[in-house]
Image (cartoon, rainbow, N blue to C red):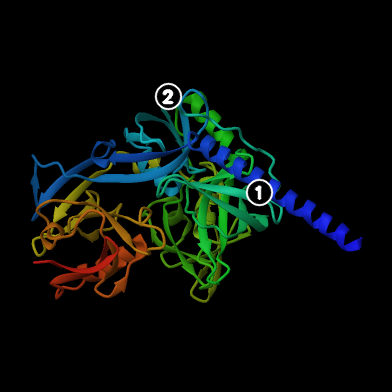
Amino acid sequence: MRRLYLFFLASLLLGALQAQSLITSDSRASLDELLQRSVVRVWWNQNLIGSGEEFRFAVNGGLIQNVAPRLLASYETDAWVYDGAGHIVAYLGPAGSWFDRGVPQLLVQTTDGQSLAARLVGIDEAQGIAVVQTEPTSLRPTPVQFKIQWKPRSEFYIASLDAGFNLSNCVVLNAEKQAGLEEYKLHFKKLRIGRPGNLVFTHEGQFAGFLTTVARRLSPMRNFFVNLLPVDQIIPSVQRIIRTRSNIKGGWLGVYLKDQPQQPRLVTAGEVTVTDVVPGGPADKAGIMENDRILKVNDVATEDLSQVVRMIQKSPAGSTVKMELARGDKILQVRSKVGNREAFEGQATYLIEVPPQDYNTIRVRRADESLMKRYDALFVGIYISDTLQPAKIQGLIVTDVVGNTPAARAGLLKGDVIVQINGMPVRNMDQYTTALAALVNNPTAHAITLRCLRDKKEIQKTISLK
């Protein structure tokens, strides 16, 4: 009798599990269908020449009056359908400062292949989010979940359009508020997709926020640490942008920063170093110098680059930011008044020069040398992206090849994935810039050897610099 009872109980449990599996499967299919009309991709293109700043083209010191250089800022983001009026919300992050000038060209692409023209409504530089508007057509807004309890073992979905519409089911292992910000640091398990700008949804299909950073711990468990901008911080900015039809400006100190990770197992953890200071800007007036290491901002310990940038941007113009810096062996306390980037820069004039010694090098500098340093960059004729590369491939994808350039003559094609430059790995834009900078500063360099992937096969291309 006992065996019969246990068999009966086991049958009930098995039936319950099967029923639960069927419910979960149906629920997932329903959620897929719902979110495919609630998540879109926005393609951003900004012609910097028409951004209100003046650019001039010079060759060998002589101005060329009838040549208009092509300087484009391009970006792509996933976005969430906010309402039935065609308002769409995207996370731009630091790229927002490029697109708040002039009129960007926007294209909204739906998961079923529709392409819709759109226009920018406004950008919140502090939050890094943007609101655009298009024709509603078949787009469907989703509800939001304001008061989310990020409890361990709770499940969420990450939505991405990187390779078609994908939902990644992930489990929260632990969560905490990020110091100095109204954001969360989450530890996810089994996050199969994820990059800054991806959308987070609850299991019921309610929008929960945007990923702002993603890092994977190097272990077989594939555990991920992410920063998340929650929906309760997003909605007030969206409502203000729609109401005022204008941008929300962020704070500005006039510093350029770089992450220098100290812990190799966690990419986003480490100290933040000042790489450049804008002469005459708020940071310069406060005594902040190149190579200073930022230890604290407003008494909050530095965790990563995103945290420091966001804390500065969220400080209103006219307020004061307190910083603790390390300069060599000294610890310094400085206070810097937060400024406004546009008020400081005003109407700038830039010169775009081609030095006579190397016609592949383009130099961009402000006409007033006292306000901006001179930078050299090597342009070989390709446009690249570090966010569109195929899954599980670490490299940079070629998004365009300009005709009659060294890259075109070498046989590079759109879609090639660059994984090495002269033997140096290039997994992100910083490594790409570093590799090319080494060539710019090396007068004996005559060629660039690229190791690429094309149709999953490894190829090698050599670009001549002469």
Where residue 137 is drawn, which disc sits there?
2
Which marked residue is nearer to the observer: mark 2 or mark 1? 1
Which residue does the numbered mark 1 point to in the structure image? Answer: 21
Res 103 quadrant in image: top left
In percent of width and height, residue 451 lies at: 25, 69
Res 98 quadrant in image: top left
Farthest residue toward the right?
A: 1
Circle 2 — which element?
loop
Amino acid residing under circle 1 = Ser
Locate the N terminus and report the quarter of the image it occupies: bottom right
Res 221 quadrant in image: bottom right
How many marks the image carries: the answer is 2
Q: Nearer the viewer, residue 311 or 3?
A: 3
The residue at the point 60 percent across, 45 percent down is 25
In percent of width and height, residue 391 lies at: 40, 58
Query: Are the residues flagged by discs 2 and 1 in contact, CB closer than 8 Å?
Result: no
Circle 1 — which element?
helix
> Is the residue 294 above or below the residue 337 in the image?
below
Amino acid residing under circle 2 = Thr
